[in-house]
Image (cartoon, rainbow, N blue to C red):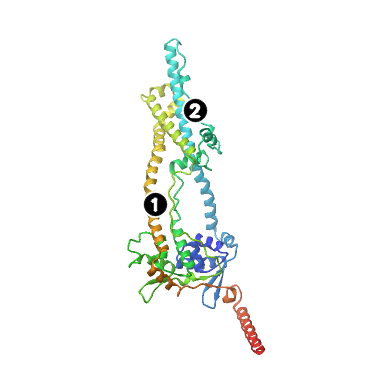
Amino acid sequence: MTLNPTIMRAVEQLGYRVTVGDVATQAGLNIAEANLGLLALASDTGGHLQVADSGDIVYLFPQNFRSILRNKYLQLRLQEWWKKIWGILFYLIRISFGVFLTVSIALITVSIIIIITAANSDRDSDNGGSHSSGGGFFYFPNLFWYFNPNYDTYHYQERRGERHQQSNLNFFEAVFSFLFGDGNPNANLEERRWQEIATVIRNKRGAVVAEQIAPYLDDIGKGYTKEYEDYMLPVLTRFNGQPQVSSEGQIIYYFPELQVQASTKRRQSVPVYLEESLWRFSAASSGQIMLSAGLGVLNFVGALVLGSLLRDGTIAAQLGGLVAFVQGIYWLLLAYGFGFLAIPLLRYFWIKWRNSKIANRNRDRLSRARLLASADASLQQKIAYTHQFAAEKVIGNEDLVYSSETDLLDQEVERSAQIDAEWQRRLERGSGE
């Protein structure tokens, strides 16, 4: 069983009655993939095929087809269970970095306090108790006030009269976001690219010129408006398009499958060009970022101070207990402290480089969109030629000659009755005249 979840989602969004062109447009899939996926889904869920007198096919699916699949296939149930389990596991992984940070700071701070207190006690003993304990000069920060999952920086901002971005992340989630960011904002770029291209084609009633598609593609080259339209080949392959040449030698492209719809739909709005989103450093608020960075610096500096105190190893051997344990994992604490600061720093410069590339691609696509908006006479003539091939076909129940929902003999009887009724109406109109 190879069911495409993208096709399943498209079928639901389109109201469970679809054509191949509907799904290809909605999901941004190529025609062949959409056709095979619909056939597999109809076979596994008891869907029905409706054939119009033009030969076009409409797929009709039960609205509970997901329940049918779950009851039919153990694999689908396991996938849904794993999706839920992975959501919990990934959340635990996300908060673990914040938890480890707080534990690291606590271990380092407590170990330093123990070592300094012991050293001061020995010094007091040597000096006859003439000096007070040095531990009074060491500040032990309250590390637990930010454990509240509803942690917010409102009061911090209010005291300074500043307005910062708001965040729905708690402290532990903000630490993960500070370290690793929040994922690729363009993870679905290719899906979005083909959805927008298919929507443009459908809005133009299935016939377009290359310049109307160019604002959604990359790596076209500077001569795309003149002679070379090789960049249209993937679009033609994906949506079964056909080129046509006018008497003036201008090429246009039309897509028969995208001209067929299962129901009348309003034209969807589509951006004038494909715009990639810039990467964000973090979805955490500025206050949470400052807090994470500050705690990271505190952790790293504390690890360096602790390392200097544990350098000869005698103190840990004398005190034992927690200090000995911390010495055993000291290099882990130091590596974590260094990585906590190094990873965001490297990621910051990487994001700047990546965003410069994205800005260049957005600028190129926007320039092609502006060129289309200010089309010259030649391009306008080329666009006018597409109107000869533009068409829109909506398959209603009255257009059907066969449906797998009912018995073929019953359909033939019903069809004959419809034909007889139509002839009877025509005869009555003729006799009335």
Residue 337 vs 137, above or below: the answer is below
Residue 324 falls in which quadrant of the image?
top left
The crowd level at tag 2 (other Cα within 10 Å; few <14, some 14-19, many 20+) is few
Q: CA distance from mark 2 to mark 1?
A: 43 Å
The crowd level at tag 1 (other Cα within 10 Å; few <14, some 14-19, many 20+) is some
Q: Residue at x 47, y 35 (%)?
A: 291
**Quadrant in the picture for the C terminus:** bottom right
Query: Where does the image place residue 178, in percent across and percent down from the top left?
Result: 45, 41
Residue 203 vs 153, above or below: the answer is below
Q: Residue at x 59, y 78 (%)?
A: 408
Query: Where does the image place residue 62, in percent across and percent down from the top left?
Result: 59, 65
Q: Secondary structure at mark 2?
A: loop
Residue 168 vs 224, above or below: the answer is above
Residue 112 falls in which quadrant of the image?
top left
- Can residue 99 be seen in this snapshot? yes
In this view, the residue in front, 368 or 142, is 368
In this view, the residue in front, 261 or 251, is 251
Query: Where does the image place residue 282, in percent across and percent down from the top left?
Result: 46, 43
Question: Where is mark 1, residue-wise?
Answer: 359
**Mark 2 or mark 1: which comes first in sequence?**
2
Left/right of residue 411 with respect to residue 306 in the rendered view: right
Total numbered circles? 2
Q: Secondary structure at mark 1?
A: helix
The amino acid sitting under disc 2 is Pro
Q: Residue at x 40, y 55 (%)?
A: 362
Q: Which mark is residue 141?
A: 2
Q: Nearer the viewer, mark 2 or mark 1?
A: 1
- Can residue 3 be seen in this snapshot? no
